[in-house]
């Protein structure tokens, strides 16, 4: 029942997000090849390289090494847009980045698994078709439906999108908390080396996204936070084929360690954004 509630809340959240976005915003990044290249580099090259280097140089439990590599190649978190916009991110860049990276995952995830197979303890039978179906069902279908509703009935979309977002976010937040608490005993068995590895990985990819985000402070924040937030649904799809420790425990461990690193960065960027807005307001006055 809880899993169903989570799936429904995610779909509603994406549907509501789609009702607040236009196709011009979705394709915004496609018209800026330099920023697009930097974004892809940060998410699909830097993150996997960091994970492989950590797996090869650190004395980590094998399941943790595998989890790091899987999480590293599963970029593009579909639930980020609203969070990033609140951080001061430019809406067109946010929506275009999330959609573009989710589309690229259809090809990059299976290709990355093939290239990095030697670093995994199993050969996951994840085909491009399986990844494509997962992305379409969990992301593109509800988001596309929302975009269609906005195109057909913009007044209706403006009226209901905020309410749907609030309700879906509340249900999803409570459900995720229940799942993590339920898996907490298993999470504790991962050990400090695993938690530390997840935290170091998060710090490294945040730094990579911050640097490659370019001179615009908002773009830096958007790319850094996006790099640190993995596509958990795809990661679980791949990890479900593995034998050994519970995949949910590893994912929950990553979420916990990642939050410890991401929250200070997010607060720092919030302060910078607030200061910049205050300076702009002062200039206007």
Image (tube, rainbow, N blue to C red):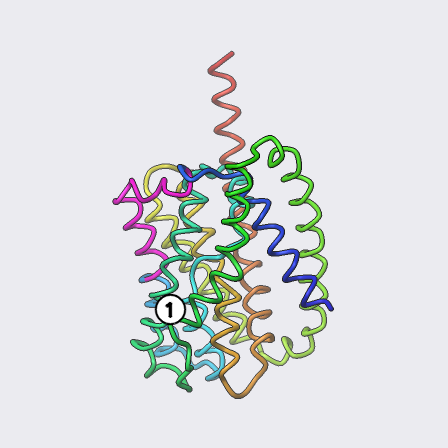
Main SS class of the magenta portion in the image? helix
- The answer to whether residue 124 is above or below residue 226 is below
Q: Secondary structure at mark 1?
A: helix
Residue located 43% across and 54% down the image: 206
Q: Is residue 87 left or right of residue 170?
A: left
Residue located 51% across and 11% down the image: 285
Q: Within 10 Å of the Cα at label 1, are there few (<14), some (14-19), or many (20+) other Cα atoms?
A: many
**What is the residue that sits farthest to the left in this orientation?**
34
State the image quarter where residue 48 is shown: bottom left
Given residues 258 and 234, the one toward you in this image is: 234
| Residue 236 magenta-highlighted | no
x, y percent for residue 217: 41, 38
Given residues 226 and 56, the one toward you in this image is: 226
**Quadrant where the image shows the N terminus:** bottom right
x, y percent for residue 37: 27, 50
| Residue 31 magenta-highlighted | yes
Residue located 50% across and 73% down the image: 237
In the picture of the structure, the residue carrying the numbered disc 1 is 109
Residue segment shown in magenta:
25-44
Residue located 68% across and 66% down the image: 4
């Amino acid at each position: 029942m809880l899993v169903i509630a989570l799936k429904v809340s995610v779909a509603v959240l994406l549907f509501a997000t789609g009702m607040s976005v236009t196709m011009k915003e979705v394709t915004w990044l496609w018209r800026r090849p330099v920023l697009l290249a930097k974004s892809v580099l940060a998410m699909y090259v830097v993150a996997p390289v960091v994970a492989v280097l950590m797996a090869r140089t650190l004395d980590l439990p094998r399941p943790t090494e595998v989890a790091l590599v899987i999480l590293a190649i599963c970029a593009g978190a579909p639930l980020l847009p609203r969070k990033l916009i609140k951080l001061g991110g430019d809406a067109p860049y946010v929506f275009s980045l999330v959609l573009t990276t989710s589309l690229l995952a259809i090809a990059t995830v299976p290709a990355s698994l093939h290239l990095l197979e030697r670093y995994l303890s199993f050969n996951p039978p994840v085909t491009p078709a399986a990844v494509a179906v997962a992305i379409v069902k969990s992301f593109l279908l509800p988001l596309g439906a929302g975009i269609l509703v906005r195109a057909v009935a913009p007044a209706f979309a403006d009226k209901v999108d905020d309410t749907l977002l609030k309700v879906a976010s509340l249900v999803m937040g409570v459900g995720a908390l229940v799942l993590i608490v339920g898996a907490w005993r298993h999470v504790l068995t991962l050990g400090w080396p695993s938690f530390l590895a997840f935290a170091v990985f998060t710090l490294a990819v945040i730094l990579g996204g911050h640097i490659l985000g370019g001179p615009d402070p908002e773009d830096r924040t958007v790319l850094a936070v996006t790099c640190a937030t993995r596509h958990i649904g795809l990661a679980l799809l791949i990890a479900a084929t593995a034998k050994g420790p519970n995949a949910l425990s590893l994912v929950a461990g990553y979420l916990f360690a990642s939050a410890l690193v991401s929250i200070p960065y997010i607060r720092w960027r919030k302060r910078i954004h607030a200061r910049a807005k205050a300076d702009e307001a002062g200039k206007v006055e």
